[in-house]
Image: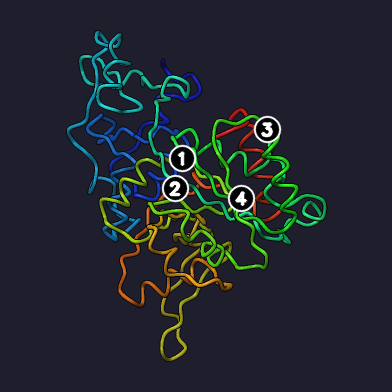
Amino acid sequence: MEDDRLDVKDFLIDEECTIIEAMNQLDIVAKKVLFVLRDAKFVGAITDGDIRRWILKKGNLDAKIKQIANYNPKFLYLKDKIIAKEYMKKYSIEAIPIVDKNKNIVSVASWNDEEFETKKNLDIPVVIMAGGLGTRLYPYTKILPKPLIPIGEIPITEHIINRFYKYGCENFYLIVNHKKNMIKAYFNEIEKDYSITYIDEDKPLGTGGGLSLLKGKIDTTFILSNCDILIEEDYEKIYQYHKKEKNLITMICSLKNIKIPYGVIEIGENGEIDNMREKPEISFFTNTGVYIVEPEVISGLKEEAIGFPDIIEKYKITGEKIGIYPISENAWMDMGQLDGMEEMRKRLEEKGGSL
């Protein structure tokens, strides 16, 4: 149950480190928790949930983690290590520090991927926008429609469906257009424990307009996803957050970090140098192309070409509540372009073929 792939030090972070540094380290350990040190002594813990709540309160990503860390963390003494699995299951945590009598961390007990699988019950419809031309993936899309481009042994859309199915989703709607008969033929022939309803888009309607074809078919909260992305996140938690906040739409957003390879100069009013920053790192959130959506969005649509971000903008203007759910940079994979497709293949191979 100890994770041989990681060293104890991978889970440790000093309380003077920043939120952004903690997010990057959480991506490395992939266990949703780090253990906080003060003067090299274990004093607390910080989770991805702590960071998410900070972000949603518009907290600064350059703030110190000591502002949000939990200084009453759970741990087990070495003599109690045998009950670690039962303890983690009881408190729904993925990793717990094992300490000696002086509370120095000597090891970290964690669930491996197989052990931590639990049955999910997110039984809501999933709509996948699968009608685009995929021009940025040419020449692959000259032969195959984008939803059927293989990532490893199966197409990208099957990866997406399998991920949602693990969380309890069993009813899928594929809005299809370009090379739609190939898409239908593939999914009709494979063995599957879920249902797929095909929605034929006779003319391009964009990432939002295609939803108008679902009137009378979906009357509950649903997930909307592009057909070229994978997200490694707990969809059940995202859904619960959406419902708790009473959002009309919740957009899943990924943190992006870009390091400028040059010195950046800020100019004052009189053409003088106001500030200089050497190779700064810029952080921002970007739309992943996955949303939790209430059914009234469908009923309010016309059968016209429109992007889903444009629909969101219209609802914002009318005062509807549109929320975001932030995830880390490494939790999102996008194969919308050729370099992204190769990166997705590489990461899935490292994970054994799937998320």
Earlier sequence position, callout 3 versus callout 2: 3
Quarter of the rendering containing residue 191? top right
Q: Position of residue 179 (x, y in %)?
A: 75, 54
3D distance between C-alphas at marks 1 and 2: 7 Å
Disc 1: which residue: 27
- Badge 2: how crowded within 10 Å, few (<14), some, or many (20+)? many
Q: Are marks 3 and 2 in contact (CB under 8 Å)?
A: no
User: Looking at this view, is 104 or 331 the one in front?
Assistant: 331
Q: Position of residue 272 (x, y in %)?
A: 45, 85
Q: Amino acid at mark 4?
A: Tyr
User: Looking at this view, is 176 or 225 the one in front?
Assistant: 176
- Front label number (1 vs 4): 4
Helix, strand or loop at mark 3 = loop
Question: Residue 190 — which label?
Answer: 3
Helix, strand or loop at mark 1 = helix
3D distance between C-alphas at marks 3 and 2: 33 Å
Disc 2: which residue: 328
Q: Amino acid at mark 1?
A: Asp
User: Looking at this view, is 353 or 146 the one in front?
Assistant: 146
Earlier sequence position, callout 1 versus callout 4: 1
Quarter of the rendering containing residue 41? top left
- Front label number (2 vs 4): 4
Earlier sequence position, callout 4 versus callout 3: 3
Earlier sequence position, callout 1 versus callout 2: 1
Earlier sequence position, callout 3 versus callout 1: 1
Q: Amino acid at mark 2?
A: Ser
Q: Position of residue 13 (x, y in %)?
A: 34, 37
Q: Amino acid at mark 3?
A: Ile
